[in-house]
Image: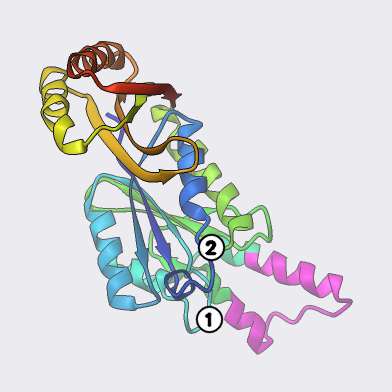
Amino acid sequence: MTPAFGLIIVGDEILSGKRADKHLAKVIELLAARGLALSYADYVGDDRPRITAALQRAFASSDIVFSCGGIGATPDDHTRQCAAAALQRPLVLHPEAKRLITERMQDVAREQGEAFDPDRADNLHRLNMGVFPEGARIIPNPYNKIPGFSCDGPGGGMVHFVPGFPVMAWPMVDWALQHYCAPWFNQQPQMERSVVLYGAMEAALTQLMERIEAGHPGIKVFSLPSVDHPVHGRHVELGVKGAAALVPAAWQALQEGLHQTGASMGPEMVRKW
């Protein structure tokens, strides 16, 4: 059975508006390319109790969750510590992470024409980026070798932790999907069919929507009203979505119901993933 997929985005800079989140749209895209869909997203500031609570929920579930941000080693990075607290496990220096971080420090020293000193205070501090909850597995970082990590939860789910920088996070999410989620790729193709309705009121469509959902298990009916669309003006987009095999019958029933109401219908849209 395909698990639910979730996203946690960590950082005060997102909630304050200092930076705009780009992860939500990209994760939706990466999932859709594999026939999967995002079920929920949580935004959390740099607050340890809130991050820990969000991760406790994720680990207690059977979901696959991606957590973006806060895995560095500066005072405002809390995600690694919160993951350990949520799992009630100690933080330990992962040996492979230590090797990769050391390689990165050696590369930087070489680029700057300096001798690498592993015992220098700042280099020892950088190893904190490889301190993960006990039992974690690393996620390779193709940008600068500083890895992320994955942890299993007691609920049967898994959380994948990546940096907040898109240039690093996105290929790391892609890697985690390929290595941990391949059995669920394109298992149940999804489809969405909808139509633009002019002059319709959502309240008048409610009974039809309820009837379609009751008569077609596994199908969701949705309505998206708009009051100032640049092309269609005031309208409602009404549609059905679900497993591709179930959508045609529900769509036909929806169309028949709309014809009976005399609704003024505009363009139709189809989306598959």
> Which image quarter holds the N terminus?
top left
| Main SS category, magenta section | helix
First to last magenta residue range: 101-126
> Which of 127/12 is in front?
12
Q: Percent from the top left, x then y, of residue 9?
A: 42, 61
What percent of the width, then of the height, locates residue 26? 52, 47
Q: Say whether disc 2 or disc 1 marks the residue closer to the N-terminus.
A: 1
- Quarter of the rendering containing residue 67: bottom left
Q: Give coordinates of residue 88: x percent, y percent.
A: 26, 68
Task: Give the numbered dot on residue 74.
Answer: 1
Whether residue 235 is situated above or below residue 129 in the rendered picture? above
| SS state under label 1 | loop
Quadrant in which residue 19 is drawn? bottom right
Q: Residue 163 carries which label?
A: 2
Residue pictured at 35% horizontal, 43% vertical: 226
- Mark 1 closeness class: few <14, some 14–19, many ≥20 residues within 10 Å: few
Q: Is residue 163 left or right of residue 196?
A: right
| Number of callouts | 2
Inspect the image, locate mark 1, and give the three-letter code of the amino acid beneath it: Thr
Between 183 and 210, the residue placed more toward the observer is 210
Where disc 2 sits, the SS reads: loop
Relative to 204, does residue 164 appear above or below in the rendering?
below
Q: Is 168 in front, or is 210?
A: 210
